[in-house]
Image: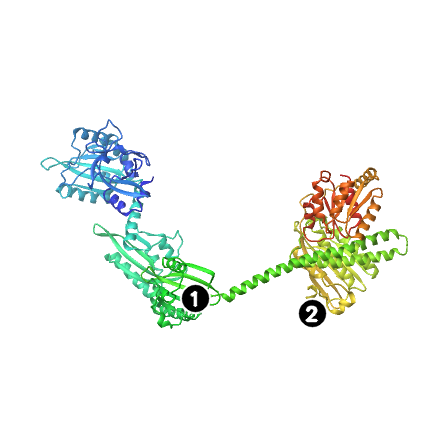
Amino acid sequence: MNPITFIAGKRELCELVLEFGLHGFLVWDLSIGIVYPSPVASKSMGMTEEQSFPAECILTNSGIRLDTALGTKESIIGRICFDPNNSAGFPFRMYPKEFAESGKNYILLVLDTTIESPNNTDPHILQSTELSRDLFSTSFRSSSIGMEIENPHGEVIEVNPIFCQWLGYSASELKTKSISDITHPEDLELELSFLEKLNRGSIQSFQIKKRYITKDKNLIWAVLNKSIIRDHSGNPIYYLSQILDISESLQAEMELQNVSRLLDQVAGLAKIGGWDLDLRTNKASWTNVTKTIHEVEDDYIPSVEGGIQFFQAEESKRKISNAVSLLLAEGKEYDLELEMVTAKGNQTWVRTIGRAEYENGKIVKIFGIIQDINERKKWEMTLAAQTSILWSFVEHAPAAVAMLDQEMRYVALSQRWIEDYKIPLTKEEIIGKGHYEIFPNISQEWKEIHSRGLRGEVLKRDEDVWRPPGWEKDQVIQWEIRPWSQLGGGIGGILMFTRDITEAYETKLELKAAKEFAEKAYSAKSEFLANMSHEIRTPLNGIIGYSDLLAETLEDSSYNEYAQIVKQSAHALLNIVNDILDFSKAEAGKLQLAEEAYNLKKLVLEAIKIMNIQAIIKGLDIQFHIDENIPPLLMFDSNRLRQVILNLLGNAIKFTETGFVECNVKRLNVSETNPVNLRISIKDTGIGIAKDSQEKIFDSFTQEDFSTTRRFGGTGLGLAICKQLLALMKSDLQLKSELNEGSEFYFDIRLRVPDFDPQLKPVESGTKDTKKGGNLRSSINETTKILVVEDNPVNLGLMKNFIKRILPEVKILEAQNGEEAIQVFLEESPALILMDIQMPVMNGYDATKEIRKLPNGKNLPIIAVTAGIIAGEKEKCLGMGMNDYISKPVQKENLKQTLLKWLDT
């Protein structure tokens, strides 16, 4: 415990310490019996700071424990004795004061000298011979307090070792020194004047703060307490001096005094911010609140001149200057309300009060308060207008507003209140009447709400459904109740605000229903697209698959061209379906990117190779240029970027009759190594696009004009999908075009360099696959069985044809739904199952779960074959226990790789 900070905020205790605490004070914790001395008290008893001791050490003059003798006495002469064999200890006059803090009881003991006034019948010094002997023994040999005895002529008779140590003299040297030799000249006159009064008998003792001069000419601040000892005839025998070195503790004591004094001043004047100026040191102090009012920084150094500068208005500056001058010169108090400008340039009104503090008839300090009264001043200046505005607002408010007093009588109300609640009275008739008189059937719940408002609560509800008496339908209101304050403080009553939101509430319900309907419609749309995808892809699977088989069969025949045309047409239709599905996903925000390390140059060349056949047919040349300083591997979604480039190349070829199509990949900022900034552009020499049509071509289902659609075909979705895909990649599709001069579509994109070393070559899989295929074929014979589960006869036949061409030795089993698949599995035990998802009777998911429950079905490879395209379908298939996934239309090569992969496991 720090005793100083413990009592710092307690005014009465601080006053007691300041008045009598010559030797400091003690804080006695009654709950544990431990005593905590202040720094001055510790020094007086030769203790180290913060060293506590038990309460049993505090005794009365007669030697009994102090706690047994405490009564109503203002002070008690006692001693603090740490040694049971020492009957004297440290004598003090103790001023006790009981107080409580945080539920615990304490006693403050203020320690004063034992010297008494002439009118007191108590002895000046403890009368016991033993105590007197012990007192001198302790005080002069081991006490930390300096002590000195002089004869009436001012000659030193005895001085204790600690005082010699402080001044640097030996005892014999000090006995040869006069008061003027060891006293600072500025303090000598004061001490001599008190000595004169002491000799005349005007006073019995005195206490001053003075500076001693040491042998090496340094200064020591000390508190000198000097008393005169007389014989029984009243003649002076000697002077007794007690000297306390306060050099180290002076700052702490002064701060305590300043805090205590400032608290006293602030509390006495009921201030907000405080200030003072010590005229002896010319040091000014501001409290934190004062700095806040002036809007200055925490480290601002205040002064009288600086404070006056905040009053910039001529009248305010004149008043404060005159007031401060009179306060300094005559001690004349002032109490002013002035306008000032803060450090941040804000104008505000303040009340400032100033008073003077005297010492020996001389002003040594001025202090006061400063209070921000800006709001009150504004209120005073505009009170009448505000009152008028308030009543006008309440009465003419477009909402239902009522102002009621503590007795729930109407003080003011708006016309809307009367109209909303169909009150058959005028405003004048309602004012003064009770709310429960106007609404006699009001519920107990509402009365409780009003009571809570009158107790200071703010209550509100955004939607409250109720039916007023006599109404045929419910009313929905929004209400708020809050207390209003009287000018003199205290709650004057409540303000009630209500608003009829029945129509808005009904509209909200309609919007909620519409939202639910829209969500159902979107769900139905997604389900429809999924079903349409399945229904369209299922026949396309047959068309594309059989056209592949037909092309292989007629490879050396003139009919091969027809088969290729069928195949290209089917792929064109598949692209249109994919565009529509991609557009739907983008529209719903369902498109996602899957970044992987890929060779950008390879990707562009693949796209050009795909489109090259169309270009050759039209007699066009596709040119390709790529910067050589582009890293070989970059991170991007290869499928989506390929889709963008294919779309742009397809459009360029479609709308170009003669000339060329040029694809450029250029690095924009060579100095930036990661990510890499690229510009990819597709330029053609085609028909071009008119300026006024260049914006709308990016709209969905839109081309330049209807004649373009008739002439070149297309859905008008390609560019819209490209733009949405590029937006996902944080890029944007741009256009440069002149009518009949060609077009250039381009986009800038930032691609990351992969973290792994691009020089590491991937493992070549060709030899491995060939070896794997050879090993597989050698292990497959007529007993190897593959079960194809498919409800569409065309797709079933196609899968069987593909399998026969890939693995002619295997036996192919058939099933048209999930139930049949389970039965065939139980009878034939196939090595692998190709499982369609959407089937009658039992779908592929349920069939897979049932097979996995069977002993032989836990590790059986089951490959999903589905025309579904809903996001997450592949993950769903794998989550249901399937091993792999093939989407329709099934490509023979994909099927071959999947079979080789799983039949070898």
Q: Hey, which quadrant is residue 679 in on the image? A: bottom right
Residue in front for this viewpoint, 86 or 396: 396
Q: Position of residue 737 (x, y in %)?
A: 72, 65
- Secondary structure found at label 2: helix
Residue in front for this viewpoint, 650 or 214: 650
Q: Hey, which quadrant is residue 124 in on the image? A: top left
- Left or right: residue 156 compared with residue 462: left
Q: Residue furthest right?
A: 557
Disc assigned to residue 599: none
The residue at which mark 2 appears reads as 692
- Which is nearer the N-term, disc 2 or disc 1? 1
Disc assigned to residue 469: 1
- Colour logic: rainbow
Distance, label 2 to label 1, CA atoms, is 65 Å
Q: Position of residue 572 (x, y in %)?
A: 78, 58
- Left or right: residue 64 compared with residue 387: left
Residue in front for this viewpoint, 817 or 766: 817
- For badge 1, the amino acid type reads Pro
- For badge 2, the amino acid type reads Asp
Q: Hey, which quadrant is residue 762 in on the image? A: top right
Q: Residue at x 70, y 56 (%)?
A: 530
Q: Quadrant of the C terminus?
A: top right
Q: Position of residue 713 (x, y in %)?
A: 77, 65
Residue 106 can be seen, yes or no: yes
- Secondary structure found at label 1: loop
